[in-house]
C-alpha cells in the first residue's frame, strides 16, 4: 500500500486514466470513480500491470450527480486520508433546444455533469482530505476561456469561480485548489464520432506548437500540482493548450 491516496473521477479512460497512471508511477494509490464498472476495472488492472503494482488502483462505480451515491465513494476510501482529489468527470452533452423546456434540460444536464459532480465529490471527501498538504484539482476546458460550447463553456467557467472560493476557504488549512484547463486533446472520448479530419487539422493549426495534445500532457500538469513542488500554487488556472489560447 502506498503512503498517499488520490481519488480521480472519470478515471476509466482518456485524461482520467492518464492521470491515474501518472500518480501510480509517483507512488500514489488511486481510487478511480466512474459510471462504467467494466471500463474502470479494465483500466485498474492495466495500470497495475504496467506499473508493477497490482493493487495500486481500485475502482468504484458511482454516478456523481446523485448525492446518494457519494456514500459508496466515502466508504471505499475508508479510514485513509485523501491526499488529492482530481475532479475529471464531465463532458459536452447535446440537447434539444426547440423548446424552452428542452433548453433548460440541456443546460441542467451540462451543469450537473461538469459542475455538480466536482462539487459533490469534493464536499464528500473534504473531511478525509489531508491537513495540512491536501490538493484539489478541477479539470476545466479551453471552452471556458474562449466560448464555443454553450452550456458546456459556462459550466467549465463556473469551476474557475468555485476554485477561487474553495482556495480561499481551504488555504488556512494548507490545502491548495487549482484548475487545469486543457485545449484539444486526442485519444479521449470527448468528441465521440463528431470529430472530422478537417476539425482535427484546424485545432492543431490553432496551436503555437503545431501538434495535438495527449492525455499525458494533462496528466503531467496534474502531477505537478499535486506535488510538493507546487505547494505555493493555489487559486490558479493552468492552461495546457499548446498556445491556442494565451494566458491572461
Image (tube, grey):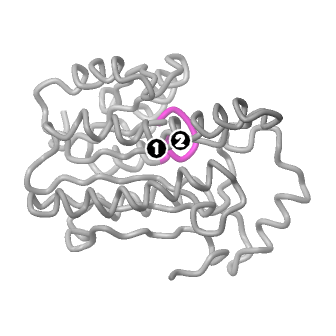
Mark 2 packing: few (<14 Cα in 10 Å), some, or many (20+)? many
Disc 1 element: helix
Quadrant where the N terminus sits is: top left
- Marks 1/2 in contact by CB < 8 Å: the verdict is yes
**What's the distance in space between the residues labelled 1 and 2, CA to CA?**
5 Å
Q: Residue at coordinates 26% horizontally, 56% vertically from top-left?
A: 166
- Magenta span: 11-18
| Location of residue 204 (image quadrant) | bottom right
Mark 1 packing: few (<14 Cα in 10 Å), some, or many (20+)? many
Q: Is residue 244 left or right of residue 43?
A: right
How far across and how far down the image is residue 62, in percent?
42, 21
Q: Residue at coordinates 29% horizontally, 52% vertically from top-left?
A: 136
Q: Please tell me the numbered disc located at residue 115.
A: 1
Disc 2 element: helix
Residue 13 sits inside the magenta stretch: yes
How far across and how far down the image is residue 52, in percent?
36, 36
Q: Please tell me the numbered disc located at residue 98.
A: none
Task: Depth check: give the residue in front, 240 or 156.
Answer: 156
Q: Residue at coordinates 20% horizontally, 46% vertically from top-left?
A: 83
Residue that extends furthest to the front in the rendered view of this protein: 100
How far across and how far down the image is residue 172, in percent?
9, 62
Residue 41 sits inside the magenta stretch: no
- Above or below, 167 against 30 in this view is below
Task: Depth check: give the residue in front, 129 or 6.
Answer: 129
Q: Which residue is mark 2?
A: 111
Amino acid at each position: 500500500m502506498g503512503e498517499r491516496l488520490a481519488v480521480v473521477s472519470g478515471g476509466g479512460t482518456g485524461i482520467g486514466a492518464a492521470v491515474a497512471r501518472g500518480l501510480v508511477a509517483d507512488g500514489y494509490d488511486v481510487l478511480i470513480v466512474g459510471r462504467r464498472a467494466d471500463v474502470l476495472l479494465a483500466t485498474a488492472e492495466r495500470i497495475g500491470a504496467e506499473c508493477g503494482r497490482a493493487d495500486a488502483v481500485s475502482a468504484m462505480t458511482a454516478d456523481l450527480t446523485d448525492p446518494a451515491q457519494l456514500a459508496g465513494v466515502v466508504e471505499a476510501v475508508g479510514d485513509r486520508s485523501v491526499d488529492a482529489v482530481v475532479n475529471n468527470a464531465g463532458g459536452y452533452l447535446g440537447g434539444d433546444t426547440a423548446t424552452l423546456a428542452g433548453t433548460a434540460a440541456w443546460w441542467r444536464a451540462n451543469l450537473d455533469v461538469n459542475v455538480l459532480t466536482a462539487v459533490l465529490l469534493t464536499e464528500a471527501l473534504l473531511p478525509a482530505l489531508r491537513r495540512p498538504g491536501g490538493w484539489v484539482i478541477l479539470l476545466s476546458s479551453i471552452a471556458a476561456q474562449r466560448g464555443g460550447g454553450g452550456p458546456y463553456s459556462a459550466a467549465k467557467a463556473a469551476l474557475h469561480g468555485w476554485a477561487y472560493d474553495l482556495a480561499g476557504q481551504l488555504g488556512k488549512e494548507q490545502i491548495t485548489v487549482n484548475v487545469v484547463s486543457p485545449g484539444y486533446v486526442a485519444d479521449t472520448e470527448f468528441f465521440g464520432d463528431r470529430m472530422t479530419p478537417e476539425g482535427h487539422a484546424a485545432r492543431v493549426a490553432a496551436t503555437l506548437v503545431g501538434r495535438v495534445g495527449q492525455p499525458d500532457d494533462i496528466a503531467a500538469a496534474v502531477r505537478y500540482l499535486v506535488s510538493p513542488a507546487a505547494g505555493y500554487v493555489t487559486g490558479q488556472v493552468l492552461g495546457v493548450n499548446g498556445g491556442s489560447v494565451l494566458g491572461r
